[in-house]
Structure formats: C-alpha cells, structure tokens
C-alpha cells in the first residue's frame, strides 16, 4: 500500500452529536505542495445506526474540501469498505462548492441500518501550492 504521510493540521468540522460516530480520520496520499492527492475519510461507526431510533435515518454524508484545495471531479468517489449506498448514482462532486456528497438512500428507498464498522471513502484533490 501507499504511505500516507501528511500532517496538515486542518481543523475539522463538528459532527452531529448522538450518531455514535468516533472522530473521523483523514488520510492524504501525499503532502507535496501542488500535488494531486488521494484523500481517504475513515468514518468510524461505533454502534449500528438504526433509522428507527430517536435520531432517525441518516440519508447522506457531506464532506467539505478545505479552502485553497481543488476538488478533482473527473475521478470517482470510491467506497472502499461497503458503506451502504444505492447501487448507482450514490456520490456527487460539486466543484465550485468544494463539496462531496454521498447518498445513503435513493428516492423511494427505505433508509438502511449502518452496521458498526470503519468505512473508508476516497476521492482526489489538488493540494495548495504553498502552506501557511
């Protein structure tokens, strides 16, 4: 496998409380300025997320790409560990908004249970030319 070497100290966004998720892990394939990098987000589900529980169903995930990074939309999002998603059309890349959206449910579907497990999602970005 590839060595994931970056320690970029990019502050994360607050996660909704009560979802039984541990803090997500963020892995970069490189930290070289201006390089194209694979980003892996590891979502750590501690307890099965049940759509019938008090918080209700989880329908989508949104991942915001930091300022000065460029989201590469010509490459697909990869679901590396079987996060329950629809069979087709389950991810959306928004270049201008720098947003990755992963649908867990499609129209007319019942929301799935999401078993306790670590789930990795992968997408590509271009890193900034310089770090501050």
Image: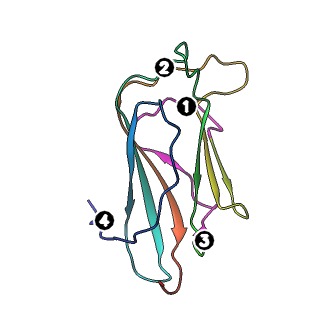
Mark 1 or mark 3: whose residue is earlier in sequence: 3
- Compare residues 104 and 53 and report the one nearer the observer: 53
The mark that comes first in sequence, 1 or 4, is: 4
Q: Which region shows up in magenta?
A: 70-90
Could you say which disc has been placed on residue 113 in the image? 2
Helix, strand or loop under label 2: loop
Badge nearest the viewer, 2 or 3: 3
Which quadrant of the structure image shows residue 27?
Answer: bottom left
Pick the front one: 25 or 30: 25
| Secondary structure mostly taken by the magenta-highlighted segment of the chain | loop
The tag earlier along the polypeptide, 2 or 3, is 3
Q: Given this view, does label 1 or label 3 mark the residue nearer the observer?
A: 3
Residue for point 54% across, 17% down: 54
Q: Residue at x 45, y 25 (%)?
A: 114
Residue 95, x across and y down, in percent? 70, 62
Q: Is residue 36 above or below residue 59?
A: below
Residue plotted at (62% across, 16% down)? 110
Report the Cα–Cα distance between label 1 and label 2: 11 Å
Is residue 53 shown above or below 103?
above
> Given this view, does label 1 or label 2 mark the residue nearer the observer?
2
Give the Cα distance between marks 4 and 3: 21 Å
User: Which numbered disc flags the more N-terminal residue, 1 or 2?
Assistant: 1
Q: Which residue is mark 3?
A: 67
Residue 2 vs residue 106: left or right? left
* Residue where numbered disc 1 is placed: 85
Q: Which residue is mark 4?
A: 4
Within-10-Å neighbours for mark 2: few <14, some 14–19, many 20+: some
Percent x, y of residue 3: 26, 66
Q: Pinpoint residue 59: horizontal percent, then vertical percent.
A: 62, 30
At a point 41% along the width and 30% down the height, the residue shown is: 20
């Amino acid at each position: 496998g590839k060595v994931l070497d970056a320690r970029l100290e990019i502050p994360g966004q607050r996660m909704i409380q009560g979802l039984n998720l541990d803090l997500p892990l963020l892995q970069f394939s490189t930290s070289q300025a201006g390089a194209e990098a694979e980003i892996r987000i590891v979502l750590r589900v501690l307890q099965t997320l049940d759509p019938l529980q008090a918080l209700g169903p989880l329908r989508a995930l949104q991942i915001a790409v930091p300022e000065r990074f460029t989201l590469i939309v010509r490459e697909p999002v990869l679901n590396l560990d079987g996060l329950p998603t629809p069979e087709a059309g389950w991810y959306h890349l928004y270049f201008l908004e720098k947003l990755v959206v992963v649908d867990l449910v499609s129209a007319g579907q019942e929301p799935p249970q999401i078993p306790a497990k670590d789930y990795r999602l992968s997408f590509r970005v271009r890193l900034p030319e310089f770090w501050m």
